[in-house]
Image (cartoon, helix red, strand yellow):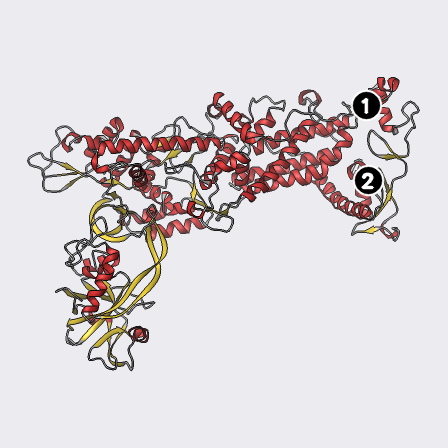
Amino acid sequence: MRVKDTLNLGKTKFPMRGNLPVREAQWQKAWEENKLYEKRQELNEGKPTFILHDGPPYANGNIHIGHALNKISKDIIVRFKSMSGYRAPYVPGWDTHGLPIEQQLTKQGYDRKKMSTTEFRELCRKYALEQVEKQKTDFKRLGVSGEWDNPYVTLAPEFEAQEVRVFGEMAKKGYIYRGNKPIHWSPSSESALAEAELEYKDIESPSAYFAEQIIDGKGLLDNNTYFVVWTTTPWTIPASEGVVVAADYDYSVVQPAGETRQFVVATELVATVAEKAGWEDVQTVKTIKGKDMERMTARHPFYDRELLVMLGDYVTLDSGTGLVHTAPGLGDDDYNTGKRYGLDILSPVDAQGKLTAEAPGFEGLFYEEANKLALKKVSDAGLLLKQEPYLHSYPMDWRTKKPVIFRSTPQWFASVDAFRDQILAAIKEVKFLPGWGETRLYNMIRDRGDWVISRQRVWGVPLPIFYAEDGTAIITPETTNHVADLFAKYGSNIWFDREAKDLLPEGFTDEHSPNGQFTKETDIMDVWFDSGSSHQGVLAERDYLTYPADLYLEGSDQYRGWFNSSLITSVAVSGHAPYKQVISQGFTMDKNGKKMSKSLGNVISPEKVIKQMGAEIIRLWVSTVDTSADVRVSMDGFKQVSDSYRKIRNTLRFMLANTTDYDPKANEVAYKDLQSVDKYLLVRLNQLKETVLKAYNNYDFATVYKVVNGFIIADLSALYLDFAKDVIYIEAENDPKRRSMQTVMYQVLVVLAKLLTPILPHTMEEVWSYLKENDEYVQLAEMPEVDHFPNEAALLDHWESFMAVRSDVLKALEEARDAKVIGKSLEAKVILYPTEPVKTLLNELDANIMQILIVSGLEVKGDKATAPTDAAVFDDVAVVVAHAPGEVCPRCRMTRTDIGVDAKLPRFCGRCAKIVETHYPEAVSEGFDD
């Protein structure tokens, strides 16, 4: 027999290396085969419901790290709620309509104009579902649990039907109307865009200062006077119908040296404009108020058209001239002002961004090219005063990344103004995290215009609108409900397959169609109306979900997207918000804080991390970051998290190895019989439980990680498990001190396995498989409850005070090690000179302090004042470290003076000899091989 055969050296088959890229997939396969998600739902039947409603990612391409952050965050919440007394089904979803899918098919060589609409839509449907399956595989590989065999997709007939019913309810309340006013138009997409589909970028535009000759100055200004206007969109000059001034501004009529003409400029801007135009010795002829110029007229720079002077409250003096060139068909403010003054709405630009015959001389020119020609015509007329580049923020199509324009064209709108106050009131009933989210969404709703919901595409849900013979739009509860029923049964392709009369209820008549002839709308609905209707298409549609949802969680861009559109439709239909709480997260950026993009080569795909390190590393990373702001991502960051994971894993492995011979049913030691230090560890464990459970309930994953990691490092590794070896390895198998410590280790394992399951489900299932618990899987267990123990406050106070003393001793040991007095701490004898309170503390601890300090000798002498000069002095204790006398026992590795006290075992100390003689008698008779 060898000496180590008399030790209880822990052994476990739990591997040191996780081999996560391989083992995770095996666990996931087992979960699916054993229907763990379904079993968890069955266990939770009848419990209070918690619904996190999934914001649908767009079905196009593999997932990126931002997707992973989002889906893992949701999974952590749902897993925690499912183990905490809630029925928390999770239905993942996908946004499956829209232009990007049409564009992908175009890239693949399909020409939409060479096939029927239905054929093209079927190709879109097939592509979208392929993308759904691709992303579904990616999400499942992250360990996300949910209803993967029954997700929601916005192209599903039942979803489309509910969307039409939402539209019908809004129409019934008068919120849907057709208008011909400027909207954001994307020439690159050939479609209208909503505000949520824009992103802004700084671009350089050609700006121009030019003059317009006064025709009718109302007796205040003569025909030799010119209004000086400014524009950053010269291509809109052909559509110019007026000039807007501010009523209360002062305007100066000036005459520069060498000029026969006089010019009108806002008084505050005369110097600036003079410098731009190269004027010298500028004389002010007179000053006039803006309101006095109302309804004056001027001549268009190159068309035979009179321009009307109008008043507007949006004129500023930040730049320009104080007089704004106005084209009512090509700008929002322009339109509103033009309508107020009764102007025609001229919009001479087509769907591709090319000017039309309504702009003579510009026909067929793309609007950017028209800039040059417009400036040339103004210059040829002798009216161009200054041309220069102008850097400003400009709206871009968020899909094509190309500029958009304002274009007046007949569109369908959802009125926001009609029930804005009701929407704003609903926001006040919602809890936001971070708190600034409420202000952000409130301000967006307060300031947004009406929602343009029509799109000039084919892959989407058709607007369920019919037209009578005289062009009157027909939107009635009867027609929309009938269309919804048809969509539910056949899908929305039926709209394109059938004639209008075959889509209307049987026998339908309308006074505007005396001959019974009808046509149908060809536009589709904005995709934000699709996803924005999911509260009806999913929450209200599925009887096991609840509406409103308890939580929506998405990126911070969704304040203008899904949070926004869902709120509008929900308040319109039901009078309340679709969510009780909203959490927003920042964007994922590269390590330098730059947005990730393939073109920059700074993208980190989840697949790459999973193949190298495992999904658990991404999941653990999610728990370490502050998602309330933008999150920086790097492979170095994942490697650091991987190191933390290894620490967690190896700590759990150590405890598993040292509880293999422990049966909780047979060997558990009651709390009252535990050693004092073991009680302390259990009380600390319960503090951990309380903090972690609270953090989970507050969706504060970073605190979960921080306190669990701190407990593992400080309470376990650096303290409890550090001195545990002298008990677990050395004492006899059934020694009460050993069983006491094993009781604590086992409870720590059970608690940590449960607490960490929402974040590390694969690893915790692996840990659970080595425990002797009744639940087959940890995911089917419940979160631990917080316990309280007799006199725990006093116990904590005592041990926290001791930890300060221990810290001082450790510093003294380190100094002795540096001075070569000792090597390992077990070579040391420590002599303490404590203050009276510390001396009392040490006596009351009821613990083997020498063992906890991991030294071979401990002596408490006198008091701090009597300490020798070579002592290390601290606030409450002086410490002398000496080399312990005696020899090293080969079994316990302590330096002892009682080596050989038992003649039958002359190499061992008295403690080890007694253990060996009692439990390994054969070793006494046969001797040791080493």
**Element on which disc 2 rests:** helix
- Near-viewer residue (548 or 598): 598
> At x 56% / y 44%, what residue is drawn?
636
> At x 84% / y 27%, what residue is drawn?
912
Q: Is 760 located above or below residue 471 in the figure? A: above
Q: Amino acid at mark 2?
A: Asn
Q: Is 412 located above or below residue 235 in the figure? A: above
**Element on which disc 1 rests:** loop
Tell me the quadrant of the picture where the C terminus can be found.
Answer: top right
Specify whether residue 246 is in view. Answer: no
Specify whether residue 79 is in view. Answer: yes
**Residue picked out by circle 1:** 2
**Within the image, what quadrant is residue 223 found in?**
bottom left
Q: Is residue 202 toward the left or the right of residue 368 in the image? A: right
Q: Is 181 located above or below residue 37 in the figure? A: below
Q: Position of residue 39 (x, y in %)?
A: 48, 23
* Label 2 environment density (alpha carbons within 10 Å; few <14, some 14–19, many ≥20): few
Q: Position of residue 466 (x, y in %)?
A: 16, 37
Label for residue 843? 2
Q: Are marks 1 and 2 in contact (CB under 8 Å)?
A: no
Distance (Cα) linking label 1 and label 2: 38 Å
Q: Position of residue 388 (x, y in %)?
A: 31, 66
- Near-viewer residue (259 or 843): 259
Q: Is residue 608 toward the left or the right of residue 131 in the image? A: right
